[in-house]
Image (cartoon, grey):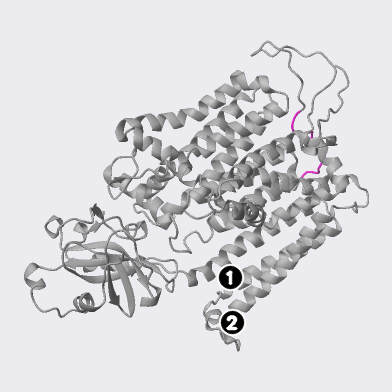
Amino acid sequence: MGRGVWRTVRVGGQTNLFQHLLVEEQGTFPANEETGEPRSRVLPFAPKSQGGRLPPVLPWALALTVILVSFLGISTLPMIGEEPRRGQVAREMYWAGDWLVPREQGQLYCTRPPLQNWLIGAIGVWQGTFDVWAVRLPSALALVLAAGICWTVAKRQIGPVAGTVAGIAYLTTGQSLTIGQLGETDSLFAALLGGALLMWISGQNKSEGGWHWVIAGFLAGLAALTKGLQAPVYFVVSTAGFLLISRQGNRIAGKQYLASMGAMVLPIALWSIPYCLSAGLQATREIWFGQVEERLATRGFFAHFVSFPVETMGAMLPWSLLLAAWADRPFRRWATKYRSLITYLMVCLTVGFVSLWVIPEAKNRYFLPLYLPAALLFSLPWQYVSETSDESSNFSPAQPRGFVVFLRLLQALAVLGGAGAIFFCFAKFLPISADALRKLQLPLLSTAVICVLAVLTIVAIQLTVRNPTSSNLASSALAIGLFLGVGHRVGILPVQRQLLWSPREQIQSLAGELRAPEKLSSLGPVPAAFRFHYPYFVRQLPRETPVEGLPDPVFCLTGTMYASQARVVPKSGQPVLQFSWNGRVIVCPRLSFSWEPRRVIALGRTPTRDPQPVVIVGEALPKAKTEMPPDTAFARALETGPGTHP
């Protein structure tokens, strides 16, 4: 076989690092068995790593770090955002005994496919209750899966130090720490789709890689059952685009690639066909395309176009700072041996980024699945330093300036983190005027843990800068992961908990006060934040339901609470009613019968939010009582306060 040489694709007269193709120029190769055409020989993604081996204890330390960051503090925060909805849909599927069709208050729920609801339902049935653990455990397990895939693929394709860094980097980006543990669909979706993209790498250049591609396609199909068609679009465009760029377009029609497409379609079809037969074609179309159509808008395009790149880099902090290492020429030269891998990762990132960049309604968290490919890019400077250090006799090779700056900034962050923990621990004893700061007290144990981790990080980084061996580099990455991940769980989450409001106790006490709590119904939909904590099914009735149609005189409906009349925002459409409650103004839809309020339960994330979404629990008044002179606060409000807004 002839000696291979690099072939470089030039665009506009300039060499593009991420468009180098690894093709051997000379030699005769057997024909492709699937197409009958001669096939080019593509070198493996990663040459054999020259980095030194890591001590056996480090992989176990990585596993412990992943488990701590994934599960520690999982129940600290109250249920927020869409978490109650995810849990309530699963609970209603269990109550109805129908695991095929997602519903809310008995109505079709056509926003998400049901994979996450199935997992929540399975955990809820297993433990006998649908609580915060049932809702968030799938996301925590998804963090473990994603970190494990990053570690495995980076270790095999780049090197052992890169594997450690990639697993830690995905777990501890700002976005992952903030939402990765919550019971939203983002964490599970990211693990499945990002895992599919990385799994495809493992089988790209192997004769037995068909199984890797089949597994990758199946993961992409499961990702579609989690959040929608974004997953198959990203997977197909990224993988096919890479094959075309690398002059392997003939493989798109090959058996292995078609098998991966079949594996992707299989789970989608296994659910979609029975769902369509049960719920109808319109519901099937809405559940797959509804949200996509809603977000295809042009309003706010320019502001989003400018801000989204900055937000993306900010959400991946602190690890996105490592991109500055690419300014180092020796590092870029070293990275050319991974050019095929880098090309693939860049294709994945570009496909995801551009698709979100041009849609003003796209949120930054939608980019989370691409954090897995990005984690491999972040790990490359670490592997470079590891290999050049092991080749150096005095362990003092030149390190990329961006890499050194990253380590120094992490040292500074550790100092600030330790100082901040001490401040919040003893804030109530300090002579400060801000009452809000004095109330945000950090437990002494949390403060001690953060300070120990901060010192560990500072020392580990200092040793790495002076002697950047493979062991020191991996140890520094683990120390950074523990400081960022565990520090967030024991330091940031308790402070957030003091700022947030949970209606759980009020809602559960309400059920104990009602004569027939199982008969409570709602006039119109009520938020899942109320229904998830209410122990019984809340049936939804049309808002125009007459008093005779109520299963019980006590009912509930959705409203808005304002701090004062001046804050009230006029409503358009249906008539509304205003009344005073504990010095605040409540606005709700006007009903067709007379009633009086019994409870008003706030559902906002903070108790001081203005305006505040609320659920009003009311009781229909008997006809005889409505003919008597009004003597309740609500009746007096009807005489003086309420009105119909245009």
Residue 476 pos. (x, y %): 74, 57
Residue 155 pos. (x, y %): 71, 40
**Which image quadrant: the N terminus?**
top right
Label 2, residues with CA under 10 Å away: few <14, some 14-19, many ≥20: some
Amino acid type shown at disc 1: Ser
Residue nearest the viewer, comparing 541 with 78: 541
Count of number-bearing discs: 2
Residue 104 pos. (x, y %): 32, 49
User: Where is mark 1, residue-wise?
Assistant: 446
Please check the rendered image and state whether residue 48 is part of the magenta-colored stretch, yes or no.
yes
Is 480 located above or below residue 237 in the figure?
below
Question: Can residue 367 be seen by looking at this rendering?
Answer: yes
Please check the rendered image and state whether residue 36 is part of the magenta-colored stretch, yes or no.
no
Query: What range is drawn magenta here?
Result: 44-53
- Mark 2 residue element: helix
- The quarter of the picture where residue 176 lies is bottom right
Q: Which residue lies furthest to the front in this view?
A: 646
- Residue pictured at 80% horizontal, 38% vertical: 17
- Residue pictured at 40% horizontal, 40% vertical: 287
User: Where is mark 2, residue-wise?
Assistant: 427
